[in-house]
Each structure stands twice: as structure tokens, then as C-alpha cells.
Image (cartoon, rainbow, N blue to C red):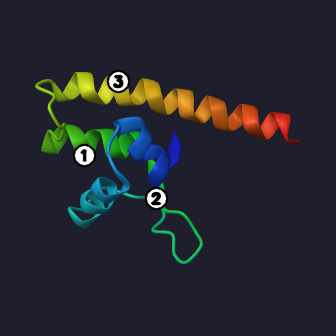
Amino acid sequence: MRLSGSELAQAYQVSANTITAWVRRECPRISAGGPGVRSVFDWKAVAAWVAMYKNGPGYSDPDEWIYSAFQRARAILSARKKRKTNHG
């Protein structure tokens, strides 16, 4: 699954600033983006990175946090697909 930085933040329920901090700590990206172009993240690569660093604000089980974020990411992508379908 490919997600933008804002979608990734939404899935993990963290701020955009947290995603920026993750990138500084070498969170993997497919594309770094640029002016007017969003960064693109691969879900599996980010999940592996998160598990390795055991990030999780207030979560004692990083695996459960990652699974919950995965479920939210799937919902985000499903909503994105529906928007595209409804708008042509």
C-alpha cells in the first residue's frame, strides 16, 4: 500500500510533525516529494521500520499499534478509491 505522509499520520494517529521526525530518523520513503508534490510511503516498509524502533505513543504493544494503524490505512485507501470512483 502506498500512502502520502498525511495519510500515514492519519493511519498511525500521529501528527504530520511526527512523520517528519520519523523521516529524519530514516523512516523509509518511496518518494521524497518536493514543492507541491507529496512524499510517498510504502506501508510494509514503514511498518517494519516502526516495529524495529518500537514507536508507539502510549502503546505497550507495538505490534498491536501497527495492526490498528494498518486497519486505518486500509480504510483511508478504500475511501480514496471511492472518491476517485464517484468523481470519474
Dot 3 falls on a residue whose secondary structure is helix
Mark 1 residue type: Trp
* Residue hosting label 3: 68
Instruction: Say whether disc 3 or disc 2 marks the residue closer to the N-terminus.
Output: 2
Give the Cα separation between the discs numbered 3 and 1.
Answer: 16 Å
* Residue hosting label 2: 30
In the picture provided, is 20 more to the left or to the right than 31? left
Q: Residue furthest bottom?
A: 35
Q: Nearer the viewer, residue 56 or 49?
A: 56
63 over 23 or under it: above or below: above
Label 2 near label 1: C-beta < 8 Å? no
Location of residue 40 in the rendering, given as x and y in whole percent from the top left corner:
50, 57
Give the Cα separation between the discs numbered 1 and 2.
Answer: 14 Å
* Residue hosting label 1: 49
Dot 1 falls on a residue whose secondary structure is helix
Mark 3 residue type: Ser
Instruction: Say whether disc 3 or disc 1 marks the residue closer to the N-terminus.
Output: 1
Q: Residue furthest right?
A: 88
Dot 2 falls on a residue whose secondary structure is loop
Label 1 near label 3: C-beta < 8 Å? no
